[in-house]
Image: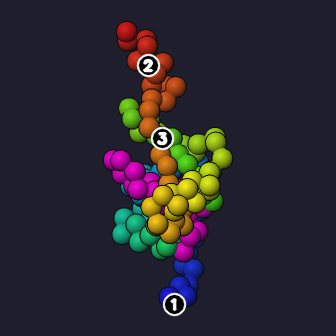
Amino acid sequence: MKQLRNTKQRQTVLNAVLGRKDHPTADRLYLDLRAENPKISRGTVYRNLNILAEGNEIKHLKTTGADRFDWRTDPHDHIMCTNCGALCDSPLPYKAELDNLIEEYTGFKIDIHRTVFEGLCPDCMQKLQKHE
């Protein structure tokens, strides 16, 4: 793959991802960047997110509803609220031994696994309890 030059737009998009801890969607990042720079296009944001993910500078998370982007590139799992869609990092350590176990059982060569735990976040649970 040929070396891509680092553009001002790409650095701006990277900084936007690095500055967040909430796993934003591409559209959320676009809207935030557009508020700062009305000349930035949706295509520029989306294209640069994909380039950054392909270069392993950020992670592209395929989740229910909308794809998200993560500043953390180390292997780790996530937790997603099935009510509000909040996505956060799991506090538990990544279990690389699961990769080996699956290899033994299936014959697949596993590079990495991605786990998303789904349930209700504490805020949504509290809101639902108030309405009961």
Tags 3 and 1 touching, CB below 8 Å: no
The residue stretch that appears in magenta: 55-73
> Percent from the top left, x then y, of residue 1?
50, 88
> Percent from the top left, x then y, of residue 19?
61, 54
Q: Is any atom of residue 41 visible in this view?
A: no
Query: Quick check: 94 left or right of 41?
Result: right
Residue depicted at 40% across the width and 66% down the height: 46
**Element under disc 1:** loop
> Which residue bears the numbered disc 2?
127
Residue depicted at 44% across the width and 19% down the height: 127
The amino acid sitting under disc 2 is Lys
Q: How far apart are marks 2 and 3 (CA)?
A: 20 Å
> Percent from the top left, x then y, of residue 59?
52, 62
The amino acid sitting under disc 1 is Lys
> Which residue bears the numbered disc 1?
2
Work out which quarter of the rendered image holds the C terminus and state it: top left
Q: Is any atom of residue 46 visible in this view?
A: yes
> Percent from the top left, x then y, of residue 118?
44, 37
- Dot 3 or dot 1: first in sequence order is 1
- Dot 2 or dot 1: first in sequence order is 1
Front-most of residues 46 and 57: 57
- Image: 110 above or below 63: below
Front-most of residues 31 and 55: 55
> Which residue bears the numbered disc 3?
117
Q: How far apart are marks 2 and 1 (CA)?
A: 51 Å
Give the main secondary structure of the magenta stretch: loop
The amino acid sitting under disc 3 is Phe
Q: Answer with the quarter of the image where residue 6 lies.
A: bottom right
